[in-house]
Image (cartoon, rainbow, N blue to C red):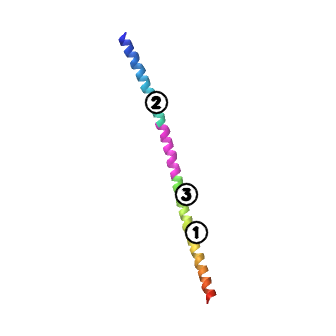
Amino acid sequence: MNFNKSVIGAMIISSILLSGCSKSAKLVDQLSSNVQTLHAKVDELSNDVSAMRAELQSTKNDASRANQRLDNQTHLYRK
């Protein structure tokens, strides 16, 4: 009788452990998927920032040229 109780107890414990492992495997897969999604979003944002830096530099150059033209015009009026 004790042997049967031991076998049944071992079966219950092993089934609990196996179900816990399958749940943790699902969680690991879900977390891995979330991390991959976040990496994709970070890469997309990084590309957007790089594009905006190029546009910002172009805008700064245009503003500098416009300011230079305005400075040249004010020098003409002062003379």
Residue with the mark numbered 2: 22
Question: In the image, which residues are magenta?
Answer: 28-42
Q: Which residue is mark 3?
A: 48
Q: Amino acid at mark 3?
A: Asp
Task: Judge the density around disc 3: few (<14), some (14-19), many (≥20) Cα neighbours within 10 Å.
Answer: few
Q: How crowded is the residue under tag 1: few (<14 C-alpha within 10 Å), some, or many (20+)?
A: few
Label 3 residue SS = helix
List x then y, in percent, for residue 28. 46, 37
Amino acid found under the numbered disc labelled 1:
Thr
User: Residue 28 bears which disc, if any?
Assistant: none
Considering only vertical position in the picture, is 23 above or below 49?
A: above
Q: Quadrant of the C terminus?
A: bottom right
| Amino acid identity at mark 2 | Ser
Vertical order, 37 against 10 (above or below): below
Decide whether residue 37 is among the magenta residues: yes
Q: Secondary structure at mark 1?
A: helix
**What whole-number distance in Å separates the C-alpha atoms at marks 1 and 3?**
16 Å
The quadrant of the image that shows the N terminus is top left
Task: Say if mark 1 contacts mark 3, CB within 8 Å.
Answer: no
Our reading of the magenta stretch's main secondary structure is helix
Residue 66 lies in magenta, yes or no? no
Question: For the point 41% across and 23% down, which residue is it?
Answer: 14
Which one is earlier in the sequence, the residue at label 2 or at label 3? 2
User: Circle 1 sits on which residue?
Assistant: 59
